[in-house]
Image (cartoon, rainbow, N blue to C red):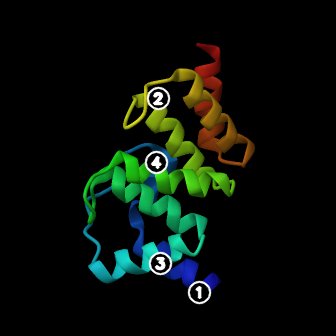
Amino acid sequence: MIKTMMKLATSVAFFTTLTTGVQAQEADYTPQQIQEMRQLAEQGESFAQAALGVLYIEGNSVPQSYAEAHKWLGRAAAQNEALAQFQLGVLHYRGQGVPQSDAEALAWFGKSCAAGLSEGCSIYSKLKIN
């Protein structure tokens, strides 16, 4: 399991997008890498589900689709994957593929904070003050 996750982590350099909110560097992934990521995601690996969700947001190596992004991020978030919860907060805050909702964004950022993601805590605090 650890070996699989390390392999996935090294092939998913864009994952900084989830923690920084900064657009990831453009990178194309091979069909083989996407297939491996999808297989892991379908097997319930939350990191792979979140990674696949980000690829669908960006349209990086897969067709851009907020619906697919939301599906995969939602599955990861249900497993308490803080990075997916954070990214769902971003989608709701921006109204990307879902109705724009500060309340829903705040809830997702709060969940990512509770799961230990400091960036989620930072944005949660900022939104809650406003």
Residue on which the image places disc 2? 93
Relative to 125, residue 64 above or below: below
Residue drawn at (44%, 43%), measured in percent from left and top?
Answer: 21
Q: Give the CA distance from mark 1 to mark 3.
A: 15 Å
**Disc 3 marks which residue?**
39
Look at discs 4 and 1 and give the one toward the viewer. 4
Q: Which residue is mark 4?
A: 70
The residue at 27%/55% (across/down) is 59
- Residue on which the image places disc 1: 3
- Under mark 2, the amino acid is Tyr
In the structure shown, which secondary structural element does the residue marked by tag 3 occupy?
Answer: helix
x, y percentage for residue 102? 53, 22
Task: Between label 3 and label 2, give the one nearer the viewer.
Answer: 3
Type of amino acid under label 1 = Lys
Nearer the observer: mark 2 or 1; the answer is 2
Q: Earlier in the sequence, mark 1 or mark 3?
A: 1
The kind of secondary structure element at disc 1 is helix
* Measured Cα–Cα span from mark 4 to mark 2: 13 Å
Q: How many marks?
A: 4
The x, y position of residue 79, in whole percent, is 68, 58
Is the residue under label 2 in contact with that under label 4 (CB below 8 Å)?
A: no
Cβ atoms at labels 1 and 3 below 8 Å apart: no
Using the numbered discs, state the Cα–Cα distance from disc 3 to disc 4 in whole angstroms.
18 Å
Assess whether mark 1 and mark 4 are in contact (beta carbons under 8 angstroms): no
